[in-house]
Image (tube, grey):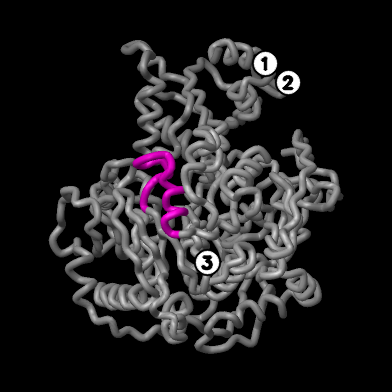
């Protein structure tokens, strides 16, 4: 893998914050100065903005790298920080969640009401045997019960594993098995694009005998929210309706203190092997950085702002910037169940107008989709309440950045383009909106207290104007504490490459411009970024090869105007299948199969049936060459291939 990455983008536009914005901004130049002077003291100060049942005296223990401990001798309760302390401060009547269902139903839930619900649910979970360290799988649509479930699990010192509601029964089963979950919280279904998308049936399938592996053994109960009103099967003794047990439970529940390093959640992300990685985050350091970055990057004034992060709770953005950061800050936020285009393509802008949204944090994929539909749609709505725009999930191209600023932000709202990962837990690189002169397409600078570099293969700084590998050079509070059950894989995946320097290698290529600002150039491994979701080629290839017709498959990410990258599959069909069938319709069949096996997000945009794949003599598939074909470029250097003629054959077959 080359560390020098060419860049094709030259962008010279700059936008300074307005005087009025800068005058009222929470994030100031002084934060950088404080962090530079004493990084650990800086993070200790941010941590003390939380409520500690037992104050910490130690800040960072880095005696056994790469296994960090932050605020290790302190004790806190994450849910107490997100709920009880706001009620006790007299803000119980402040709205926490402005929830809108896709059909248009709505609920306004105050901090006092959300606290009561979480306390009742905590009592229900305790009665079901859930306690400190137990794992709970959450498989829910974007409804208030999803946020309440995360907080109730956290309140008990247990560990949640949220699984995106679009994932299949097999994907859910693998995550339940890996975590050893004791309980699943789900719903009958949720609304998506005008129809009810069933969830409980997928849970039933996941817990049943899958492919002869036997019934799932660790799950004892399934707690079900009634949302879709769709018919569901019921297992007496295992399954419980939320509406039967939660309202009937006591609302008296005292939050206990847990150590700062008590595990908070496992979140599975695709790896470069077929097995998903369970990224483990703990409590004190994670909550400190999620809360701080939400406050200073989004310039969050909880008394006056209406904040909306559009991410699903199934992804890390929904953990850090829907549940934990905003609620720890006492914010009022919009929670929306549906998709941007249902029942009409202006739905998001309708919600911005309806709720007076002031801060919008969304993905470049969504912005590009709106660009494709045209400015006439957002122009129908009053978006004048918006004062800050954010971007998350993948690099945003300058054209989309400018459209976002002009059409959605009325050429006034600053844009914060944020870089971070499931593994980092919270924002690492971003403009501070009251300080930074922003540049379309650039993530810009590390947030105060974070140390980033772009280096060559040998770990040396590339210097301004050059590209290379992005690394984090110092431990940070929200960093992952490991891969669940696999410490060796944690070390090997993230720390081995720059072991001598002690750098965390993020897996991304980046360049530094002449000002030293960071520009991302995409992944340097084979993990694709589709609509802001990281998907492993290996996982998708495994699913394709599971199809009856398929002998072998290679998957690449190809540039896509709407989704950033799209999945493109090159598939070799079994001769035995061809002897009995024609290949007509196979592409569609394989696409559907992948959707069933992994989820719709992983469905290939294109499936090309080929006779051979480009391989090196050692058998490694040269995906770089397939990417050239998928994107219509001239095929690059083929000299390392075992059969140099294979690419011309593939190119002819694709055309």
| CA separation in Å, label 2 and label 3 | 58 Å
Residue 198 vs residue 351: left or right? left
Do the residues under discs 2 and 1 have CB atoms within 8 angstroms? yes
Residue 578, quarter of the rendered image: top left
Give the residue at x 37% y 28%.
547
Residue 400 vs residue 453: left or right? left
Q: Is residue 96 above or below residue 272?
A: below
Is tag 2's residue or tag 3's residue first in the polypeptide sequence?
Answer: 3
**Residue 336 has which mark?**
none
Do the residues under discs 1 and 3 have CB atoms within 8 angstroms? no
Which residue, given by chain and number where applicable, does mark 3 sit on?
305
Q: Is residue 485 visible?
A: no
Q: Can residue 458 be seen in this view?
A: yes
Range of residues picked out in magenta: 337-355
Residue 468, image x, y percentages? 77, 45
Near-viewer residue (480 or 21): 21
Quarter containing the N terminus: top right
Near-viewer residue (530 or 235): 530
Give the residue at x 52% y 63%.
320
Give the residue at x 54% y 37%.
375
Is tag 1's residue or tag 3's residue first in the polypeptide sequence?
Answer: 3
What is the secondary structure assignment of the residue under circle 3? loop
> How crowded is the residue under tag 3: few (<14 C-alpha within 10 Å), some, or many (20+)?
some
Near-viewer residue (324 or 93): 93
Q: Nearer the viewer, mark 1 or mark 3?
A: 3
Residue 341, quarter of the rendered image: top left
Which residue, given by chain and number where applicable, does mark 1 sit on?
644
């Amino acid at each position: 893998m080359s560390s020098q990455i060419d860049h094709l983008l030259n962008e010279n536009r700059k936008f300074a914050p307005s005087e009025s914005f800068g005058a009222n901004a929470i994030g100031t130049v002084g934060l950088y100065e404080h962090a530079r002077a004493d990084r650990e003291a800086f993070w200790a100060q941010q941590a003390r903005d939380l409520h500690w049942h037992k104050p910490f005296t130690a800040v960072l223990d880095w005696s056994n790298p790469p296994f960090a401990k932050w605020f290790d001798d302190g004790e806190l309760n994450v849910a107490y920080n997100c709920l009880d302390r706001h009620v006790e401060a007299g803000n119980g009547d402040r709205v926490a969640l402005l929830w809108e269902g896709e059909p248009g139903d709505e609920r306004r839930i105050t901090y006092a009401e959300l606290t009561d619900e979480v306390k009742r649910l905590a009592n229900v979970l305790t009665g079901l045997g859930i306690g400190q360290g137990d794992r709970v799988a959450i498989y829910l649509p974007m409804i208030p019960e999803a946020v309440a479930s995360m907080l109730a699990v956290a309140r008990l010192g247990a560990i949640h594993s949220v699984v995106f509601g679009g994932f299949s029964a097999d994907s859910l089963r693998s995550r339940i098995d890996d975590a050893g979950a004791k309980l699943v919280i789900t719903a009958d279904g949720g609304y998506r694009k005008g129809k009810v998308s069933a969830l409980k049936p997928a849970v039933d399938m996941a817990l049943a005998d899958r492919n002869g592996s036997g019934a799932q053994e660790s799950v004892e109960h399934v707690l079900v929210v009634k949302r879709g009103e769709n018919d569901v099967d019921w297992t007496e003794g295992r399954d419980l309706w939320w509406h039967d047990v939660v309202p009937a439970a006591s609302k008296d529940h005292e939050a206990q203190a847990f150590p700062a390093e008590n595990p908070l959640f496992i979140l599975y992300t695709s790896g470069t092997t077929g097995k998903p990685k369970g990224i483990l985050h703990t409590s004190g350091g994670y909550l400190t950085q999620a809360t701080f970055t939400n406050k200073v990057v989004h310039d969050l004034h909880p008394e006056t702002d209406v904040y909306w992060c559009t991410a699903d709770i199934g992804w890390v953005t929904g953990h850090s910037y829907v549940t934990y950061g905003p609620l720890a800050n006492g914010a009022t936020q919009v929670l929306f169940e549906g998709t941007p285009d249902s029942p009409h393509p202006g739905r998001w802008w309708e919600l911005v107008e309806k709720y007076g949204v002031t801060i919008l944090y969304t993905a470049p994929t969504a912005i590009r989709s709106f660009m494709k539909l045209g400015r006439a749609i957002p122009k129908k709505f009053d978006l004048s309440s918006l004062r800050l725009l954010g971007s998350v999930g993948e690099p945003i191209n300058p054209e989309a950045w400018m459209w976002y600023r002009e059409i959605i932000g009325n050429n006034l709202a600053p844009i914060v383009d944020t870089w971070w990962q499931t593994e980092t837990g919270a924002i690492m690189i971003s403009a501070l909106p009251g300080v930074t002169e922003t540049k379309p397409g650039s993530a810009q600078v590390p947030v105060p207290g974070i140390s980033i570099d772009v280096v060559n293969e040998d770990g040396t700084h590339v210097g301004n104007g050059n590209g290379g590998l992005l690394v984090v050079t110092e431990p940070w509070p929200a960093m992952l504490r490991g891969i669940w059950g696999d410490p060796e894989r944690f070390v090997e995946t993230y720390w081995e490459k720059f072991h001598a320097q002690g750098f965390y290698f993020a897996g991304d290529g980046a360049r530094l411009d002449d000002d030293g600002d960071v520009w991302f150039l995409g992944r340097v491994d084979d993990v694709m970024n589709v609509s802001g979701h990281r998907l492993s080629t290996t996982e998708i290839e495994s699913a394709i090869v599971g199809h009856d017709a398929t002998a072998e498959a290679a998957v690449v990410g190809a540039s896509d105007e709407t989704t950033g990258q799209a999945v493109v599959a090159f598939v070799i069909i079994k001769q035995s299948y061809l002897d009995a069938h024609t290949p007509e319709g196979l592409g569609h069949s394989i696409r559907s199969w992948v959707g069933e096996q992994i989820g719709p997000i992983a469905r290939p945009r294109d499936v090309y049936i080929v006779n051979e794949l480009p391989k090196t003599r050692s058998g490694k598939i040269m995906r770089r060459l397939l990417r050239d074909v998928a994107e219509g470029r001239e095929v690059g250097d083929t000299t390392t291939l075992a059969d140099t003629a294979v690419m011309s054959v593939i190119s002819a077959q694709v055309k």
